Image (cartoon, helix red, strand yellow):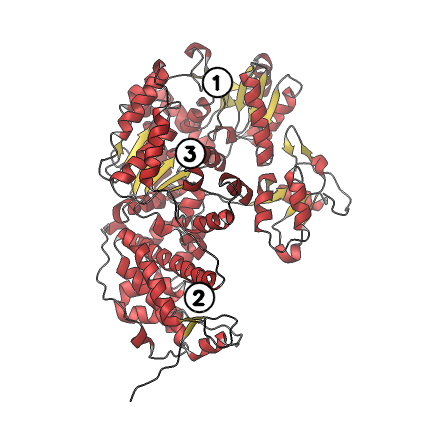
Amino acid sequence: MIQIFPMYYAHSTERADQRDWQTLADHLRAVADIAAEHGAAFGCDQFAKALGLLHDLGKYSDAFQKRLTGTRHAVDHATAGAVEAKNRYGSNLGTLMAYAIAGHHTGLANGRALGQRRPLVQRLAADIEPINSQWTVEVSLPDIGTPPLKSVRERAFFQYAFFCRMLFSCLVDADFIETENFYAQLENKPRTRGARPSLITLKTQLDSHLASFKSDGPVNAKRREILDAVRGRASDQPGHFSLTVPTGGGKTLTSLAFALDHAVAHDKRRVIYVIPFTSIVEQNAAVFRNALDPYGADAVLEHHGSFDAQNIDALADSEPGTWDKLKRDSENWDAPVVVTTAVQFFESLFAAKTSRCRKLHNIANSVVILDEAQTLPLGLLRPTLAALDELQLNYGTTVVYCTATQPSLTGTHCGALPEALEGVRELAPEPARLFDAFKRVQIRHIGTQSDEAIVDRLAEAEQILCIVNNRRHARYLFDQVAECDGARHLTTAMYANHRREVLADIRQRLTEGLPCRVIATSLIEAGVDIDFPTVLRAEAGLDAIAQAAGRCNREGKRALADSLVEVFAVASDDWSPPPELKAFAQIMGEILRQHPEADPLSPEIMQRYFDMLYWQQGDDGLDRCAIMKSLQNASIDGLPFEKIEADYRLIENNQRAVIIPHGDAKDALRDLEYAEHVGGLARRLRPYTVQVPQAGFNALEQVGAVTTIRPEEFGDEFVVLMNTDLYSPESGLNWSEPTFMKAESLTW
């Protein structure tokens, strides 16, 4: 007698006869195939396949099938597969798989401790809806052995957690893609992913672009020497590399050329360029698109919060559906060249949410360039280095630490750091010699300076940049010289588009030889391409001094004797820097006292600075939330995924975003009044926002200077400045002494 099983479905449609519903077996097998393809990048295709086959096992329950036909109450369809994974694959590997399966919609939960999600141990022990044994007929689970991972005894549970996140990434991305494909097919909507130019094509195009560069003159000749030497190392075995190139040495395109050459030579899948600041992301992405033209717009995926639909559509000639495709690709970094922020990259490596983890499998077997590597987060350096080393050790990723101020990350120099990297190979030819060849500035310490002395110095110089550590200090100094010809101010109290306008004006004045006196905070050191004859810099870490020096004689057109970076101590206690900056400045002073004749920007001195900095911080200071310690004492069923995600934050954001109703923001705010979908509007408004400290925000709110748009629907996402008198075209938003504003109707 033939046994007839009922039909089980994964996804329903509006058809009552169920003719176009997706069967559960089809969905599980399709997800398994995609997940296996993802996992193959790090040799774990069968592990990922098993996750795909098990993830929706709970849909074999009558309760879930009734839900598809109209029952509205939620049904847990993930725990059944998690239980089966542990039963089938054992308490170690099976539990790691159970985390991923149980969290494939809600995210990775803590193993035992309470968090936003129910702990895994509780879920595995709870009563669940019984499932039909038909699944054993329709699903054939693979036999899998031990994961092919090299172990590091001191960080075993860190490795387990990392492996779990990578498998989780394979599963959740496959589930999203397969479900998306099913519904797109029903609607006859193409859902193209990937379909980008190959890395070989991009390498050939970059070769052509670089061949047009001039090699005349000593500077261009040195740049060509660096480029050729670095590209000549592309066939070296994958692993950790440093690229120590002085300002002006052409490291941006040199690093891209190495990455493409190395990726082609070793069959890597993509290049991921990680940059600490959004402004440099935009800048470098534009450089890459130009260098890879005509493929650049389609090859380079720029992923950060300020990159909006209009930008992307313009880049891709506004082809129908381009934004949808690029938005999908940004969800999982399915592009040959990804340019992203350090926040996006590193926080994803420690994430628990599905949206953040989807991309992780695409980092495997790639080339990662860490631009401005000295900005690796000091208080999170230990877990950060552990993650980078894990990518290299077990996931086929080559990592390049690229900067003019190379941090001391290797065991040779920083033996006290438990996660110090081994086997880092320098790509640049004789960095010390290069720094001598590219020396463009003289750095001298001019002692303690009063505000009056700084103001006099600014007034007497025609073109000068002054960088201080305190936003209030910068504002005060600007106010004192505001009447001087060419006085300009740059501050995070300005919205991003305003800062761009001010920078364009500064560049124009410098080019035309007009007076230009700029007072700014350290934001101007973040890869801003400007060139002053003189820079004043308040005491800070040596790496910050080097960044400031990059704004002086940047093009190398002035004599060395005429290009000064003057470092000073601030006299007034009113402008004291944060304690950490004061500590960095003290270390800088100590290093320079020990080596009075040395060039402060030389690789040797920079390395000594970072050695002392890391030694002073100690293990606890380099892991402020004790992430590594928490994992040393963990267990397989007690991995704290949610806690790690909460602890690993590059930016402690206690600030509130305020929208300034200028320019295009006015149109976006008008549209926001009635819009149903606000994602695109939020991106349009982001370049017009100012981040305000909570105390300042409270002051603005107390006097009615800000209002919230549609709070019942969007919470506090859209807060707008009502009293625009508080926003100055010279110095941005003033929240220190806001004036009372009578409530009025909103008009933009």
Residue identified by numbered label 1: 447
Query: Mark 3 against mark 1, which lies toward the viewer?
Result: 3
Residue identified by numbered label 3: 293
The answer for how far apart the CA atoms under marks 1 and 2 are is 58 Å
Q: Secondary structure at mark 2?
A: loop
Q: Is residue 421 visible?
A: no
Residue identified by numbered label 2: 118
Q: Secondary structure at mark 1?
A: strand
Query: Can you say which quadrant of the picture contains the N terminus?
Result: bottom left
Where 11 sits versus 742, above or below? below
Residue 233 versus residue 388: which sits nearer the camera? 233
Residue at 32% over, 25% down = 603
* Amino acid marked by disc 3: Asp
- Residue density around tag 1, few if under 14, some if 14–19, many if 20 or more, within 10 Å: few
Q: Please provide percent x and percent y for residue 194.
A: 39, 49
Left or right: 110 in relation to 238: right
Where 62 sits versus 347, above or below? below
Where 216 sits versus 290, above or below? above
Residue at 45% over, 60% down = 180
